[in-house]
Amino acid sequence: MSGTNTSNVGQTGTFSGQGRSAEWDQLHQSLHATGDAIRREVVGEEYVNRSLANASEFTMPMQELATEYAWGGIWSRPGLARRDRSILNIGMLAALGKSTELGTHIRGALNNGVTEIEVQECLLQVATYVGMPAGMEAFRVADKAVQEWKSNNAASAATATAAAAAAAAAAAAAAAAAAAKRDSK
């Protein structure tokens, strides 16, 4: 490949110090720091630490790319709330059949305030538009992920369950009021 820079092929570590400008290095370090913080807030310290500890010299560049660009570049954007990004990720990962990442992002979604009912509704939507096999697999992954999250977050799970029950009751009351109004005409 004429003109292709292959000087950093096979190197690991962050992108700094590879013949780039100081501004380039600073930008990447900033994105990496932001991404690392967001990633830890969403999927948890334990998951991130385990992912980094289990990364080989070969796979570490992928961990860095995900941290810097996905978490630092996309998850830090102001246009969508984290819970909305989580719902989008659940739908996309379920549709793609990426079970390992789906479980991780379901736990992250619960950390971001997505309710168990919202996870179910997202996966029902996936099953309808992508197919029942994808939906069934996604539900199996989600059930395990939700149970793991609940066992690790007992207080948060109780609050989420109470909030979901209150939301369901409010929705039922609104539907009943709308039906009563419609019937009174």
Image (cartoon, grey):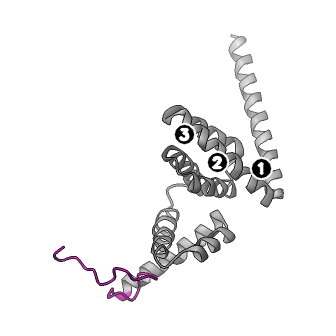
Q: Is residue 73 above or below residue 104?
A: below
Kindly identify the amino acid type of the residue bearing the numbered disc 1.
Ala
Q: CA distance from mark 3 to mark 1?
A: 26 Å
Query: How many numbered discs sit on the rendered protein?
Result: 3
How crowded pointer 2 is (Cα within 10 Å; few <14, some 14-19, many 20+) is rated as many
Residue at mark 2 to residue at mark 3: CA–CA distance: 11 Å
Q: Which residue is mark 2?
A: 141
Question: What residue type is disc 2 on?
Answer: Val
Q: Position of residue 90 (x, y in %)?
A: 57, 49
Residue 31: image x %, image y %? 48, 75
In terms of depth relative to the viewer, which is nearer, 29 or 139?
139
Residue 24 x, y percent position in the rendering: 37, 82
Mark 2–mark 1 CB contact (< 8 Å): no
Q: Quadrant of the C terminus?
A: top right
Asked if the residue under mark 1 is in contact with the one under mark 3, i.e. CB atoms within 8 Å, the reply is no
Above or below for 175 versus 66: above
Q: Nearer the viewer, residue 56 or 158?
A: 56
- Residue bearing mark 1: 160
Q: Nearer the viewer, mark 3 or mark 1?
A: 3
From the image, tell me which residue sits under label 3: 134
> Upstream in the sequence, badge 2 or badge 3?
3
- Magenta span includes 75: no
Mark 1 falls on what kind of element?
Answer: helix
Name the N-terminal-most of marks 2 and 1. 2
Q: Residues within 10 Å of mark 1 (few under 14, many from 20)?
A: some
Do labels 2 and 3 touch, CB within 8 Å? Answer: no
> Magenta residues?
1-22
**Left or right of 45: which side holds 158?**
right
Disc 3 marks a residue whose amino acid type is: Ala
